[in-house]
Amino acid sequence: MTAKKARVTFLNHTADMGIRVTAPTLADLFERAGEAVIDTMLKQRPAGRTSPVRLSVAGEDLPDLMVRWLGEILFLFEGEGKVVTDMDIDSIWENRIDATVYTVPFDPEVHEMMTEIKAVTYHQIEVARRKDGWQATVIFDL
Amino acid sequence: MISLEQIDDCRWRIPKSGAMRVPGLIFANSDLIRAIQQDQSLTQVANVATLPGIVGYSLAMPDIHWGYGFPIGGVAAFDLEEGIVSPGGVGYDINCGCRLMTTRLRADDIRPLIRDLVQALYHHIPTGVGSRGPIHLSPSDESRVAVMGAEWAVQKGFGTPQDLERTEDHGAMAGADPSVLSGRAMQRGRDQLGTLGSGNHFLEIQTVDQIYDPVKARQFHLFEGQVTVFMHTGSRGFGHQICDDFLKEMGQSAHKGLLPFELPDRQLACAPLTSELARRYLAAMACAANYAWANRQILMHWTMEMFLKTLSIRPEELGMNLLYDVCHNIAKKELHQVAGRAIRVCVHRKGATRALPPGHPLLPEIYRSTGQPVLIPGDMGTFSFVLAGAPGSMERSFGSSCHGAGRVLSRTQAVKQAKGRAINRELEDKGIIVQSRGKQTLKEEMPDAYKDISQVVDVVEAAKLATKVARMRPLGVIKG
């Protein structure tokens, strides 16, 4: 894992909130961005590698793939009450990602909520190669 | 840098440039325009002006702030033949809106019981992130809610037929078709009817503290010292999912080159109004709008029950009645005069409230002479307002007004500024009891995070979009 070199910065937006993620590889970029969804919503992302869920997401290009990927993590939470705790990116191309995400059931008594994300938006979406890795910018609708 | 020309004390124009098809028009005074220029909302007004079939102006209300795609506080009308519909121009929270209930109570009579009322509402009304309520809809009932809206709730015993008359579109938008909805939308809608949600959604006990127009106030059954209840919520995860589904589908067609123009922002993904995709989106959007009206109808009923129980009074003593329910995130096909010609257009109101003038045929009989009640919530520490749609509003703003104070601080900035402060105690010192589910909500939503609502409303009045009728002060607030 090279994810320790990856970085997430939370961005200011008047109504909503964004993240800027930098990472050495595309897989790390998607992994850290996925974790940032949970880190935005919960005070502390729970640990553990239980209840794996296989996710296969297709997109038109990398920005679209990022929005759809984060949308899947959000849907697991909002639609199925599952909190993603950890993940393995099995493979990633420009228009497809296959991953295993580990989950625990959401328990409002245990998992302290911070902010609700209504949706992952396409507004100013960016996924781009930088000279030393990758960078993504994503804005959430809160 | 967006160039801006001042027209008068309350209007500013962004001249047509580049790919803009019409100019931008912002309703604001010079104080507000300074704050507006701090973020990217004016660029968003200009971006909306590039969309095909837009008529008149790309408009922005005085509470405009940076959204995603459309600005929050944006209004844009599109020709039905040449124009588009954009899910981002409606927003994720389809038919997010406000509902105001009047009572026979005077604030002085219930002041010692406000804390009990807030507690009762907080424990009885499901609030917070992903909140689920006691109503579990079967797929067939969920489809009925999507088609019938508030009437479904009334048929189930939540309220009276009179409430429907006092709800925009009678609480049911025509054209809803649940067969176009995704399995995910249905899944998310199943358990969220009768829930308030989180963020800026709230239920507030208030008192009328100022009357501006005694004649209209009487017609709205408002009097000084009266207890009112203000609600702000929408279509919950059901609406979010519908917006998300169609943004992705419309984004895909843009990617395949099926849109004959360049999108300035991917969040502005849209479909020609004449297309099958637009038809399906509008049918799905109507489902979410109806879900939101049913939601607010049910929450109003539970609020009434909690008042009766906590105060141990009879319904006729409480006299809780709906004044009006109006949405502020929607796209609607309406008849407007454009360049001296009456045409049907699709008006997008993203964080903007419909404000029909007196005499408009869509108004219920009781409000035909007053103009439509326009409900404008402020932040939880200051005021909310009731206005009435002004003569000429149709020509000036496609019959639209502002929808709230509008944020001035981002949530992160608000939390930072609130560090070390006990927001709930500060509010209590002002006589406002607050209960909130989320630990951060009070900081994110503190009064300093919003523009001065009085200035916003004064601009709306000066621009003759709507006129002030009454002002309410909060006594107790529950938030998600």
Image (cartoon, coloured by chain):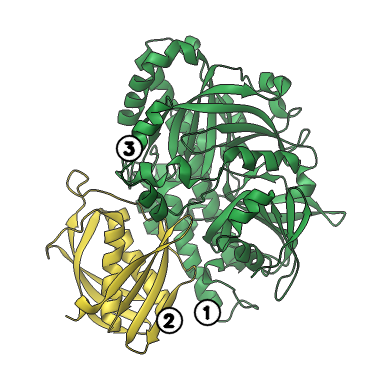
Which residue has dot 1 on it? B255
Residue type of the residue flagged with mark 3: Ala
Same chain for labels 2 and 1? Say yes or no.
no
**Which residue was labeled with disc 2?**
A61
* Residue A30 as seen in the image, left or right of residue B445: left
Chain yellow in the figure, letter:
A
Please say if the residues under marks 3 and 1 sit with CB atoms less than 8 Å apart. no
Q: Please, which chain is the residue tagged with disc 2 on?
A: A
Nearer to me, B49 or B452: B452
Q: Is residue B153 above or below residue B56?
A: above
Q: Is residue B372 above or below residue B287?
A: above
Q: What label does residue B422 carry, if any?
A: 3
Q: Residues within 10 Å of mark 2 (few under 14, many from 20)?
A: some
| Chain identifier for the green-coloured part of the image | B
Q: Residues within 10 Å of mark 1 (few under 14, many from 20)?
A: some
Residue shown at the point (39%, 49%) measured from the top left: B417
Density class for disc 3 (Cα within 10 Å; few <14, some 14-19, many ≥20) is: few
Tell me the amino acid under the disc marked 1.
His
Callout 3 secondary element: loop
